Image: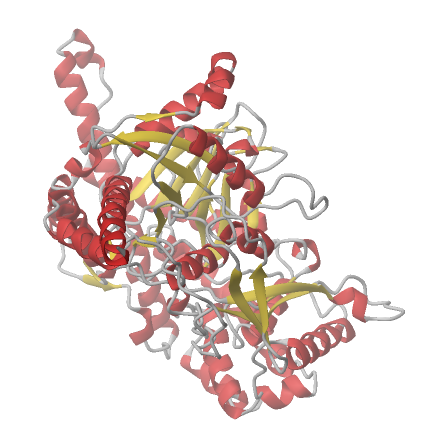
Amino acid sequence: MKRNYKLLLLVLLLAFASCSFTSKKFEDPNKDKLIVQLVTYLLDETHFNPQDINDDFSLEMFDEYLEQLDPLKRYFYASDIEEFEKYKTELDDQIKAYDLSFFNLTYERYVQRLAESKEIYKEVLENPFDFSIDEDFSTDYDDLAYVTTKKDLKERWRHQLKFSTIANYDDLISQQNREDKLVEETNSEDKKTDSPKKSLAEIEKEARDITLKSLDELYEYMEDRQRKDLLSVYINVIVREYDPHTAYYEPEDKERFDADISGNFEGIGARLQKKMDVITIMEVIAGGPAWRQKELEVGDQILKVKQEDEEEALNVVGMRTSEAVKFIKGPKGTDVTLTVKKVDGSIQDITITRDVVEMGETYAKSSTVIKDGKKFGIIDLPRFYVDFDDVNNRNAASDVKIEIERLKAEGIEGLVLDLRNNGGGSLQTVVDMAGFFIKEGPVVQVKTSGEPKEVLMDRDRSIVWDGPLVILVNEFSASASEILAAAMQDYKRAIIIGSDQTFGKGTVQTVVDLNRMVRNNTSGDVGALKMTIQKFYRINGGSNQLEGVKSDVVIPNRYSYIDIGEKNEENPLPWSQIEPAQYDVWDSYFDYDTTIAKSKERMANNEQLKLIDENAKWVKKIRDKELFSLNYDDYRASLDVSEKEAKRFEELSKYQTNLTFNSLSQELKLIEKDSVLREKRERWHASLSKDVYIEEALNVLNDLKMTYGIKTKVATSVKN
């Protein structure tokens, strides 16, 4: 069920901090100091870019820690901050001395203010909100000052809770209007027995009750947490000053890089990661329940989770990812409803029936298509997978090689490798895969701080595919995807089509079990540290870090104007450059420059892409809005305008390329016996037939094929 457009931040306003805690006394101060000691030692000795823990470090850490504790500035008073600021330039000294005095002070004060706030929000929500007065609400919390009195604090809560409640109020009014319309359309005698229509006062009361219940549930969750959770927040503020991919994991999370609710159990089939206090969809596993349901997308933010046997949804904003996963996964056949904030800012309820997640669709798959009388091949690669327990088992490189050979047997004249939304994976599979398209040579350079660079080479002179090659990327193509795209671009072996640039993650991380560093440990499990230890560099010497891979042909998409990628993370490592490797540009007769120029001209005149670009700008406008009216008439009018604007872009989903995609002959035999596989391929092919990016990739392949013939004739003429 899609809710009123831009029902923004209803649940986000109920977020308090990254974690929440009970007021248990310090359980083991020696263990806390040991964790700080181990973490800081490893960072100093092993991190790619060790930091000077000095006063500047202390100042940055101080601000970030307070933002983690009180992002909406509705717990602490100005007097609390004044007391905390005595430590503002002393945190570096405390870290070096493994002194947790500042942490202990803020923990005790936080628990106190949290308890006080519970009484405040209950008191505020006892009184009706007047949605007829002119009043605005800003979501720009950075400009807020800390309050000085309890009266001011109560007013801040009132303001924020009114914004939460007006969304509920609008939702209830819209629901009643829909029900009234349905009754009118039925035109039956049942109209006479309908329950009385709710008054606006009754609706306002119900809206407040919904807000109250959400807060009560969140506080119940918060009160079950322990002091160690806040210590984890504190330590993570320290380590995130190094770079955004360095993190401390509590014992129960030390096996996780990010939450994966896919694999060998029953769930929805999605990969999650916590970003800025919100659980975000990083990948929808092909073939899984969410993939089949078709509504959940990469970039969606999960705000609430509702079980099929419960009336109310649970707010998961602020929860650790591992905790949220427990509510999202569940037995096969049961329903879970996710309240998500979409990329365009709208709020949507998505109900998914849990099932056993099938991992087969995460593997490479291929298809053929006829374009202008020529047959082309497409390989979709969701990730660079490998079985680390058995390196001889199937992996992305071996699977792609098989698909290429099968496509060649089908007589293709060009190949599209689709790396969109591919977040990376095994480094060795990238090196092996790059070798399929070049004779031999360097693929990527790896640098460890203080050590000579290492050049990873393809030493196999055989070439699996020497024809026209296009690689599709977007903002979510990261790490290993960027390595392959960059190498093919530097060799001038392929044309890169997609977003302005890829994600821009040019670093590699390792996870260290801290317990292995402690002899005769009597403190119990001390967790693990994930940290950045290396940087990747292109063979031309430039880093993929921050800048990613710039597409040869830039095609707009819905994320074009949204802040996505490494450069928008906190404290990313800088871009840098080293000496290029020795390599020779691909020796072929394909005219890449002419082909790219023709594609750019075609893009400039493509009406579908113009509409996509307009939609992307509109999405950016919606997401950047910070001021909202708390007058209901104005609030509703703003929603109406947004909904009207949104209808302009409904045509995007109706686009068709008139291309027909087909499974390969080997797969057709399997499809005859496997109806599930048939459904998967039919859905994939239908999606490809509506994909303007695939369409342009095929146009580029066609142009490359044409330039080959022209340049071959020219070369032959010169030789004669």
Of 54 and 153, the residue lying toward us: 54
Q: Is residue 345 above or below residue 649?
A: below
**Residue farthest toward the right in the current orientation of the protein:** 520
Apparent side of residue 669 relative to residue 135 in the rendered image (left or right): right
- The answer to whether any part of residue 581 appears in the image is yes
**Residue farthest toward the top in the current orientation of the protein:** 189
Task: Count the numbered circles shown.
Answer: 0
Residue 181, given in percent of the width and then of the height, sits at: 15, 23
- The answer to whether any part of residue 328 appears in the image is no
Of 254 and 693, the residue lying toward us: 693
Q: Residue shown at 37%/45% (left/top)? A: 467
Q: In the picture, which quadrant includes the N terminus? A: top left
**Residue farthest toward the front in the current orientation of the protein:** 720
Residue 5, given in percent of the width and then of the height, sits at: 22, 43
Residue 226, given in percent of the width and then of the height, sits at: 65, 60
Q: Residue shown at 28%/51% (left/top)? A: 8
Q: Residue shown at 85%/68% (left/top)? A: 521
